[in-house]
Image (tube, rainbow, N blue to C red):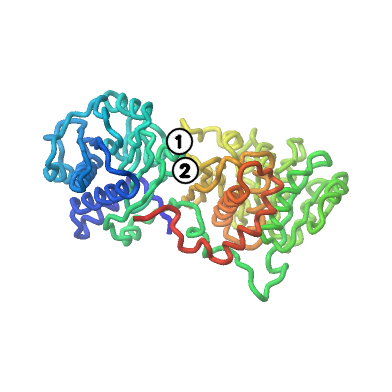
Amino acid sequence: MPELLSVAEMGEADRLAIAGGIPGITLMENAGRAVAAAIIARFAPCETAVLCGPGNNGGDGFVVARLLAEQGWPVRLWLLGERGMLKGDAASAAVAWFGDVLPLRPESIAGAGLIVDAIFGAGLSRPVEGVAAELIGRVNREGIPVVAVDVPSGVDGDSGAVRGTSFEAALTVSFFRPKPGHYLYPGRARCGELVIAGIGTPPAVLETIQPQAFLNGPSLWGSHFPHMKLAGHKYDRGHAVVVSGGPTSTGAARLGARAALRTGAGLVTVASPPEAVLVNAAHLTAIMLKSFRGPEGLAGILADRRLNACLIGPGLGLGEGTRPLVRAVLASGAACVLDADALTAHADAPPVLFDEIGANPGRPVVLTPHEGEFRRLFPDLGPDQAGSKPARARAAAARSGAIVLLKGADSVIAAPDGRIAINANAGPQLGTAGSGDVLGGIIAGLLARGMEPFMAAACGVWLHGELGNALGTGLIAEDLPEAMPGVLKRLDQSSFAGVPPIPLI
């Protein structure tokens, strides 16, 4: 499983490994060896400055310096603090280093062709300042390649936040399992290539830690994916309904409906006010149409329990009739995706929406806000109030009783039970009008096919990212559903099965 470990959980993994009989210095030696191997595989020997801090991250740096020097690399080692202040395994690693230990200063990088950053680890709790900050700024300005040990110094391993300043690494080598900060912006942009190395920590420690954060991908939800069966038919694959707005705002619903159908829902219906039916009919063929008037009419359509999933919000508008329509969807037995206007319509009374979700706790509900919509529903869960993006999404899911997909370049999917997934495969080309409507339709299609809601949301986000990658620059939202068959074919053929999301050494 693609577990992500917090800084505290990684510390616990180390503790459990040591308690199980693996000496701490062995873990440190293995970590340093992994970093040195990654460097040798990617760089030609050159003048290398190894920058060490006063903790275990610095101890890893001492090992890296020794191993590179043993391979004939010209290495100089610089230490923040006094050598005599090193403790435990870091002190033991320093004893094994046979070269000079120079005091860290901004001039430490003079003449260096490569920097090994082992100053601060992932658990940095305060802004980088003083000599370290000045040195980091100089390295970044001069563009010297940096290999970071664990995380680039200055990046928070839990949140990805940059504390004051940080290196802009070309390569980051971390250990055992990744941390959330490797995939959350802005830290993700500072890591460069990411390699996760095994250092001898037994995977069995995860049974004690019970991590609740995961990197999104097929290894997370692949066993839940509803692959088609040879003897199956369309009625086995569910019937999704997408609620359309009036005649001048129907395009968003059609995008969502097309995505739901391409994702494999057996049947898809666009439900719209009577005055919008002909507009939708002019654009739709395989997708069916139903007309309704008001919340009672929509409730009547959804009374047919074969219609088992519903997307509402795209292009719906913010008039006084929107909230009653959302209420009708939530009162039905259908799994629900609430997006766009369905969320913003409740900006002045979020608890009303959450109460309606809670009235039927067994029914799957997925909320898909971008940052602006999230702030409207959860005004007290901003970055400055509730911490990291995963922490904010977790709190929102617990409060709302729904799966919360907080969208962005580093989308986070959170469940009320505390599970989160961080998505890392989406490119900037998805930032185009209607892209979010397609995402809502993908998730609705997966819910119609019976996928568990947390897994459906995670799978939907990943598929959306793969569609963008397949199409590349210049895509528009209408292109995305049409690329789905190729992506699903690869998934059905298990092209992704067992492929690690990041290189392992």
Name the residue: 71% across, 58% down. 261
Quadrant where the N terminus is found in the figure: bottom left
The label number, if any, that marks residue 390 in the structure image: 2
Q: Position of residue 441 (x, y in %)?
A: 67, 51
Foreground pick, 424 / 415? 424
Lateral position of residue 446 relative to residue 130, left or right: right
Secondary structure of residue under mark 2:
helix
Residue 136: which quarter of the image? top left
Kindly identify which residue carries mark 1.
186
Q: With respect to residue 153, does 420 lie above or below?
A: below
What residue appears at the point 34 percent right and 58 percent down from the top-left corner? Answer: 206
Residue 132, image x, y percentages: 28, 28
Q: Mark 1: few, some, or many residues within 10 Å (few <14, many ≥20)?
A: some
Picture layout, residue 406 above or below residue 82 = below
Look at 72% across and 41% down and name the residue there. Answer: 323
Q: Is residue 98 left or right of residue 57?
A: left
Please tell me whether mark 1 sits on a helix, a strand or a loop.
Answer: loop
Amino acid type of disc 1? Pro
Residues at circles 2 and 1 in contact by the CB criterion of under 8 Å: no
Q: Residue at x 72, y 68 (%)?
A: 235
